[in-house]
Image: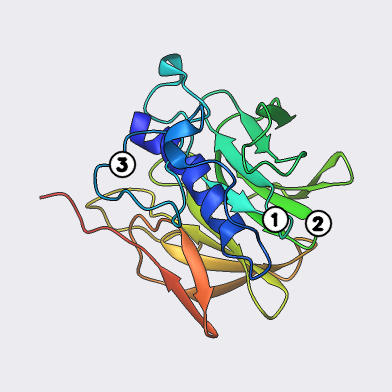
Amino acid sequence: MKRALSLVVMLMVAMVQAQPDAPELTLPCWYRPTDLDQPWTNRNDVPCLEEVIHDPAAGELGFTELAIAPDNTLYALRPNTGQVMVLADSDGDYLPDSPRVLVDGLVMPTALAYDDGDLYIVDGARLYRWQDGELATLVDDLPAGTGYGVGGIAVGDDGRLYLSVGAPCDHCEFSDPTRGVILSYTLDGDGPQIIARGLRQPGDLVFLDGALWVTDSARAR
């Protein structure tokens, strides 16, 4: 769990330093209060591995999905508590402020994506959009319940949402055409389309050079 929590801040620092005009860190890694041991390097021109949240009570699914905004604000999904957390760097010291709850009261959120100021959140059978401090339901009949749910969500270059939906079971045959697929919607949750079939437990998905990539897993023997 410690590795997963550390990854949150490592990703954020890495994205900040990736900006062409970003200055170098003013403090060496070993002087930063949240630094973790990095035996593989002693260079100061690479992102620090830092831990800013340590909550053993959160369990193995303490944080699952991440999304980052162009201003380097990091959003993290906490499925067990039904929350979306936000980590920002308001004073520009490359250390995130104390994490705060952005969205609360979700049941078991599993997927998160950011696009043009909006957060898209999958929570069971519902697809939400967090916009200007309001949570709006876009879809309320996503495939959910038994089996594998929605593993990931991404926004395509075509301005549509893409969701990876798991199969309802592991070894059985099923007839539901909306399971084991990649679904696509408009940004308002309209115009559902099935893009791909034949998946089992698809995880996160991402667009790269115009192609959609998705992870999946084989059946258990």
Q: What kind of element bears circle 2?
A: loop
Q: What kind of element bears circle 1?
A: loop
Name which quarter of the figure residue 27 lies in: top right
Q: Is residue 73 visible?
A: yes
Residue nearest the viewer, comparing 104 with 6: 6
Evaluate if marks 2 and 1 touch, with contact meaning CB atoms under 8 Å apart: yes
What kind of residue is marked 3?
Gln
Which residue is under mark 2?
A: 117
What kind of residue is marked 2?
Gly
Residue depth check, mark 2 versus mark 3: number of the one nearer the observer: 3
Quadrant, the N terminus: top left
Q: Position of residue 215 (x, y in %)?
A: 36, 63
Could you tell which of marks 2 and 1 lies nearer the N-terminus?
Answer: 1
Residue furthest to the left: 221
Q: Which color scheme is applied?
A: rainbow
Q: Position of residue 31 (x, y in %)?
A: 48, 32
Q: Is residue 177 visible?
A: no
Q: Using the numbered discs, state the Cα–Cα distance from disc 2 to disc 1 in whole angstroms.
A: 8 Å
Q: Using the numbered discs, state the Cα–Cα distance from disc 1 to disc 3 in whole angstroms.
A: 27 Å
What kind of residue is marked 1?
Ala
Label 2, residues with CA under 10 Å away: few <14, some 14-19, many ≥20: few
Name which quarter of the figure residue 82 lies in: top right
Which residue is under mark 1?
A: 69
Q: What kind of element bears circle 3?
A: loop
Label 1, residues with CA under 10 Å away: few <14, some 14-19, many ≥20: some
Q: Using the numbered discs, state the Cα–Cα distance from disc 2 to disc 3 in whole angstroms.
A: 34 Å
Name the residue at 52% across, 29% down.
52
* Relative side of 210 to 172, left or right: right
Which residue is under mark 3?
A: 38
Name the residue at 66% across, 30% down.
106
Residue depth check, mark 1 versus mark 3: number of the one nearer the observer: 3
